[in-house]
Image (tube, grey):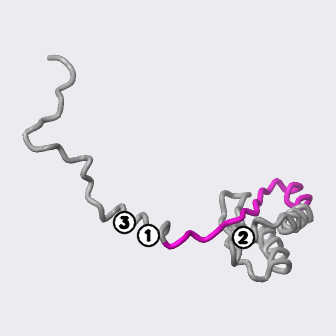
């Protein structure tokens, strides 16, 4: 991440943390002049509150002129931690044998094409 993008994301992170001190923020650079800031709320239900969205919009608008002037793109994205079953799904899928790849005994795959 270049220094200008880092400075812009640091200011935005500071503004979000000032309003939402319980949020965990993760900055992910997406290119030379773009980044995502994931806002992880302590409770998923917080995103149901319209006032929260209004506050996020105000924070974004305060930074918009500075970001656009220099051609940068920074997106504030709500993010919620995955539930335990969702987090464990990839591991469960890796452990399950690929039965659909197996052919029943005595059967061969169909021959395609001509000679």
Mark whose residue sits in front, 3 or 2: 2
At label 3, counting other C-alpha atoms closer than 10 Å, the crowd grade (few under 14, some 14-19, many 20 or more) is few
Pointer 2 and pointer 1: residues touching (CB < 8 Å)?
Answer: no
Q: Residues within 10 Å of mark 2 (few under 14, many from 20)?
A: few
Report the front residue among 89 and 7: 89
Query: Cβ–Cβ below 8 Å for labels 3 and 1?
Result: yes
The residue furthest left is: 106
| Disc with the residue nearer the chain's start (3 vs 2) | 2
**Residue 50 at x, y = what percent?**
85, 64
Taking the image as shown, residue 101 lies to the left or right of residue 13, namely left
Helix, strand, or loop for circle 1?
Answer: helix
Report the magenta residues as a range: 64-84
Where residue 112 sits, quadrant-wise, is top left
Q: Nearer the viewer, residue 110 or 50?
A: 50
Image coordinates for residue 20, horizontal then vertical, percent: 81, 78
Residue 15 is situated, as x and y percent measured from the top left of the image, at 85, 75
Q: CA distance from mark 3 to mark 1?
A: 6 Å
Q: Is residue 68 magenta?
A: yes
Q: Residue at x 75, y 66 (%)?
A: 47
Looking at the image, which is closer to me, 39 or 14? Answer: 39
Secondary structure of the residue carrying numbered label 2: helix
Q: Quadrant of the N terminus?
A: bottom right
- Circle on res. 31: none
Q: Disc 3 marks which residue?
A: 92
When the figure is inspected, residue 69 is found, relative to residue 19, above or below; the finding is above
In three-dimensional space, the C-alpha distance between marks 2 and 1, rounded to whole angstroms, equals 22 Å
Residue located beneath label 1 in the image: 88
Residue at horizontal 82%, vertical 53%? 71
2 or 1: tag closer to the N-terminus: 2
* Residue sitting farthest toward the bottom: 21
Q: Which residue is mark 2?
A: 45
């Amino acid at each position: 991440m270049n220094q200008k993008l880092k400075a812009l994301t640091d200011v935005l992170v500071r503004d979000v943390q000032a309003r939402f001190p319980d949020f965990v923020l993760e900055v992910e650079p997406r290119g030379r002049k773009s980044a995502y800031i994931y806002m992880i709320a302590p409770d998923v239900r917080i995103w149901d509150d319209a006032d929260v969205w209004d506050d996020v919009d105000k924070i974004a608008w305060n930074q918009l002129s500075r970001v656009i002037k220099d051609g940068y793109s920074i997106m504030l994205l709500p993010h919620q931690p995955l539930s335990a079953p969702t987090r464990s799904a990839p591991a469960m899928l890796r452990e399950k044998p690929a039965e659909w790849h197996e052919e029943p005994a005595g059967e061969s795959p169909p021959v395609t094409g001509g000679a």
